[in-house]
Image (cartoon, helix red, strand yellow):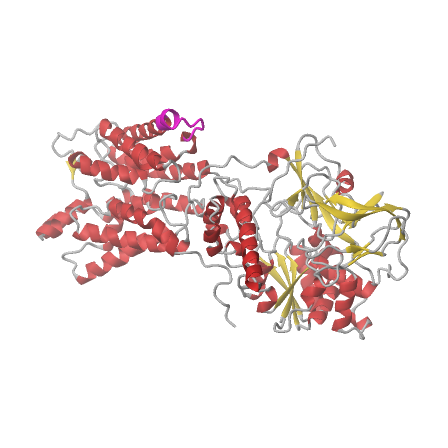
Amino acid sequence: MKTFRIGGVHPAENKLSAAEPIKVAELPKVAVFPMGQHIGAPAVPCVQKGDKVKVGTRIANPMEKALSTCIYSSVSGTVQKIDTIIDASGYAKPAVFITVEGDEWEESIDRSDKLVTLKDKPELTPEDIINKVKEAGIVGMGGACFPTHVKLMPPPQFKPEWVIINAVECEPYLTADHRLMLEKADEVLVGVDLLMMAAKVKKGYIGIEENKPDAIKLLSEKCKAQYPNIEVVPLKTKYPQGGEKQLIDAVVRRQVPAPPALPVSVGAIIQNVGTAYAVYEAVMKNKPLFERVVTVTGKQLSKPSNFLTRMGTPMSQLIEACGGLPDGDCKVIGGGPMMGKALLNTEVPICKGSSGVLIMSGKEARRGEPQPCIRCAKCVSACPMGLEPYLLATASGKKMWDKVEGEDITSCIECGSCQFTCPSNRPLLDLIRMGKQTVMGNIRARQMAAKK
Amino acid sequence: MANILNVSLSPHVHSGDSVQKNMYWVVAALVPALLCSFISFGVGAIITTAISVAACVLTEWVINKFMLKNPKCTVCDGSAILTGILLAFNMPSNIAPWIVVIGAIFAIGVVKMTFGGLGCNLFNPALAGRAFLLISFPVDMTTWPNPGQGLFTLVDNSVDGATGATPLALMKAAFKTGDPKMLEQLPSLQDMLLGNTGGCLGEVCAAALILGLIILLVKKVITWHIPVSIILTVVVFSGLLNLANPQAYANPLVEVLSGGLLLGAVFMATDYVTSPMCAKGQIVYGIAIGALTVIIRTYGAYPEGMSFAILIMNAFTPLINSKFKPKRFGEVPAKK
C-alpha cells in the first residue's frame, strides 16, 4: 500500500459521520460573505446596501492585478449592510450581509440532476474551462483556498504531467469529501476529466486512504468502465497524507523541493475532490461556487451530520441542527482537529474552505501540562518534512532566528504531527509557528532591501 | 451565548503519550531481567534494587524540594525510579547497601540534577554512577556471587566458593595467560542465555534482556537503530578478530551474551536524553559504542567495556546531533 515516505502519525480517526448521507441545510436568515475567504487579496464588493440579489448573483469582484477571485451570493434577498465580521481566522474582515427572502435562483443556472459529460459538450476547450472556473470563483476546497484557475495555468517553464485528486481526507472526524465521493461519484469524475483537460494532462490519479474502502471500490469501478486514464490509488491511512507535498510523494513518488518550488515543478497539479465537484457544476451546470458539503461533528453532538450548506450560513445554525452545543465549556473548531482553527464565536459563517465544524468538550481539547523535553526524538520521526521540531521549537523560543532559518524552518507545513506526538506535551508547533513567521518576515525584508 | 469557548492553536488532539508512560514501559521491560536475577542470585538482587530505587527517588525529592525549591513533583515522572533500577542492575547483587546509596546520590545528585534535571543531563546517570563506584570501590564492585545459592539466602562473600569470576574476566585471564584450560571454565552459551553465571545483577540473563528489547520495540518506546547497530557491530568486529586468531580472541556470540552488552545496548545506550536524535546519528552512535566496547574488552585494562563505551559516546552526542540531520523532504531530486 502506497504512502508518503517521511514521518507521519496516526491519530484516532473518529469518522463519526461517515455513514450519514448529505442533508440539505436550511437557509439562514442572514447570510454573511467575508471578502477574504481565499489566499491572496480580498475581493471587492460590487453590490450596495439595498440591492436585490438572487442565488448565484455576483456580489464581489476579484481585486485587480492581484491573486484574487470573485464571490457569489448563495441566497436571494436584500443587501443589508457591508460591515466586518470575525471569521474563522479570528480577525474581523469586511463582509457583505444579505437578508434572506425566499429562494430565487439566477435563470442561467441549470438546476436539473441530469449528468452532463464531456461527450455532451465536445466544443469545450481548455481555455473555456479555465475561464468558467475563474468566473465561478472556485478555490481549493480542502481548506487552503488557493484560486483554482491560477493552479491550472502554471508558469510556462513548467509542464504538468498529472492531475492528482486529493480525496485523502486525512484529518480525523471529517467526512465531507468521503460522502461527496459516494453520493456524487459521476459528477466528481466528470470534474476530474475537466481538470485534466484544462491542465492539458493525459493522466489523472485519485488518492484515497484505505479507511474509505467503499469510496475506493465505487470510484475504481467507475474509472475502469468509463475513464481509463483516471486511476484510483488506495493509500495507507496516515496523517498528513492530504498535505500537497505528501500526497504527491505518496502517489507518484516525487518530492517537491523546498519553497519556492511548486508542486507543478515536479509535474503535479493537486485538486481536492470538492474542487473537482465544484468545477463540474461551474462548467457543466453554469453554477458558481456558493454551496459546499460541511461535516458537523463531535463526540458530544447528538447527531453528527454532513450538510450541503449555502455559503454564509452561520456555524451556530448547523450546530443547532445537530443537537446544539453541549453544556459546559467546549471548543468549536473550524476544520479538523489537527489543523483546524478554534473559533472565537459560533456566528462565523461557512466559507469556501470550511470543510467541517468540530465540537470538542473542554476536557477533550485541554492540553496536557508541558514537561521538560526528554529528547526522545519522537517528534523527529513524526515530522513529515524531515525537520527537527525539538530544535526548531527550542531555538525559536530563544529567538535564535538565524539558527532556525538555517535549520529549514520555512519548510514546516504546520501539520502538528510533532506536537501531537510529544510525550512531554510541549507546545512545539506554537513556538515553530512564531519562528517561521519571523523568519519569513526576515526573508521578505532582505528581498525588499535587495530590490532597492 | 451560555457556553464558554476554549481557544488555542492547532493541533487540538494529542496522542496520549506521556513521559510517565515511556518511563514505566521501560521499567516493565526490566522486570523479566529482575526476576531472572532473583532466580540466579536470590533475594539480594531484589533488596539491592529496592535500596537503589529508594535512594535515587529520595535524592531527587530532597534536591528538588529543599535545594531547588521547585513546587512541582519531578519524582512522579518515573525517571528517578528507572535510574535506580538501572544503577542496581550494574552492581553485584550482594553489594553493601551504603555503597548503593553513594552511587545513587552521585547518579542523581551530581550527574542528573546538577545539569538541570530530567532532559538536561549530558551523561547517563546510572552508568556514570556505576563508573564512579567502579573506580571508588573496585573490589566491592567486582566481587561477583555465584548463581544458584538459594532464593532466600543472602550470599556471604567470605564463604569459600560463594563468589567467582564473570565470563569476561575468565576470558581476559585466559587470553592473557594463553592457558586454554581456563576457557573450559566458561559457562555454556545456554547458561549465559538463562543467567546462570556470575556478573552484575541485571546483566546476566540474556534471554530476559532480549524479551525487554521486544517489549520496548513493540510499545514503540525506542526504535531499533541503537540496539541493533551496537549488537551487529560487536558481532562483526569481534567475529573478524576471532576469525583472524581464535586462540587470542573470543567467539562473537560469547561477546554478545556476556557482560553488560545486552543490558547496555537495550536499556542504557537507548536512554532518550543522552542518545542522538535522528536515525542516522543513532546508527553512528551505535556503531561507535559497539566498536569501543570490543576495543576496551580486548585491549583495555578492564574486562568490561560497555559502560565506558556508552559514557564516551554520550559525550559525543551533541556533536553527532549537529552533524547528522534527518533527510529533509525534497532534499534529493527524485529519479526521473
Q: Position of residue A121 (x, y in %)?
A: 81, 72
Residue B268 can be seen, yes or no: yes
Occupied quadrant, residue B138 = top left
Would residue B96 be found to the left or right of residue A169 on screen?
left
Outermost residue toward the top in this view = B66
Task: Give the answer, above or below, for where A272 lies relative to A21.
Answer: below
Outermost residue toward the front in this view = A452
* Residue at 27 percent of width and 59 percent of height: B236
Would residue A186 be found to the left or right of residue B160 on screen?
right
Q: Quadrant of the C terminus of chain A?
A: bottom right
Q: Quadrant of the N terminus of chain A?
A: bottom right
Would residue A36 be found to the left or right of residue B85 on screen?
right
Task: Give the answer, above or below, for where B131 lies relative to B318.
Answer: above
Q: Relative to the observer, which residue lies in front, A127 or A184? A: A127
Total marks placed: 0
Q: Position of residue A75 (x, y in %)?
A: 85, 50
Task: Give the answer, above or below, for where B158 lies relative to A208.
Answer: above
Q: Relative to the observer, which residue lies in front, B122 or B217? A: B122
Q: Position of residue A175 (x, y in %)?
A: 68, 50
Residue B261 can be seen, yes or no: no
Occupied quadrant, residue A218 = bottom right
Q: Position of residue A181 (x, y in %)?
A: 71, 57
Which stretch appears magenta?
A: B62-74
Residue A126 part of the magenta-drawn span: no
Occupied quadrant, residue A114 = bottom right
Would residue B227 be found to the left or right of residue A12 on screen?
left
Q: Relative to the observer, which residue lies in front, A93 or B44? A: A93
